[in-house]
Structure formats: structure tokens, C-alpha cells
Image: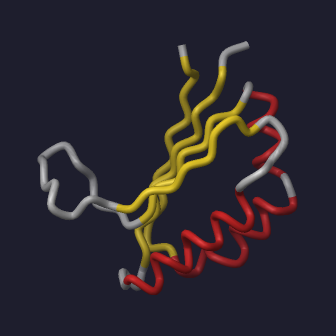
Amino acid sequence: MPKLAHIVYFTLKERTAESIEHLLSECRHYLNSHDGLISFDLGTHVKDLDREVNGDFDVSLHLIFADRASQDTYQVSDRHQTFIANNKATWQNVVVYDSYIV
């Protein structure tokens, strides 16, 4: 079974340094250390790399799972659902890309 990459881009309603740091902290608390999670990384938008192909976002979440089943379990986990419930109101937009790593 191939590994699965789950990449999420968050745009916040309040695009302040404090709001960004809060979401990063929430991601670290709720989304790290799930069964089958191989890699957990967070990022922030590089504002001075203004290219036509770069989207606009505040926080990026990069998760690599051992397989599709691990990612499916993560999606319905209590910690993931709590993260969504606690933070959803702060999001202006969320874009998710899931892909198999070949």
C-alpha cells in the first residue's frame, strides 16, 4: 500500500501573528502523534515569494500517513474532530490535497 500525503492550507479570518501562532499550537496539540502518522510538519506562508502559482494562505499542515487506512482512522479520531470543533470558527478558507506518494 502506498503512503498517503494529507496537505491542508488554512486561511484565517484574523490574519494576525497571534492567530497564526494559536493555530500552529492547536495543530501541534491535536494533530501530532496519531497511529500510522509517519511525518508531521507545519508551515507558514512565505510572503516575499509572490509568484503567480503561489496560493494565499496562513498555515500549512503536512501529514504523511503509512497508508490510506491510517489516514481514514485519523479523519474520524476524537482528537481530529476536537481540533475542527475548536478552530473551525477561525477559518476563512481551508483547502485540502490528499495524494498517494509513489
Q: Is residue 92 left or right of residue 50?
A: right
Percent across and percent down for residue 93 are 44, 65
Instruction: Name above or below for residue 99 compared with residue 102.
Output: below
Instruction: Name above or below for residue 86 compared with residue 83.
Output: below
Of residues 55 and 48, the one drawn nearer to the viewer in this rendering? 48
Residue at image position (63%, 39%) is: 39
Percent across and percent down for residue 74 are 79, 46
Q: Is residue 79 left or right of residue 14?
A: right
Instruction: Name above or below for residue 55 compared with residue 87.
Output: above
Q: Which colouring convention does the figure follow?
A: secondary structure
Corner quadrant of residue 81? bottom right
Count of labels shown?
0
Instruction: Name above or below for residue 15 compared with residue 41.
Output: below
Percent across and percent down for residue 22 are 55, 80
Q: Is residue 79 left or right of residue 27?
A: right
Quadrant of the frame with the N terminus: top right
Q: Is residue 70 left or right of residue 88?
A: right
Quadrant of the frame with the C terminus: top right
Residue at image position (58%, 80%) is: 89
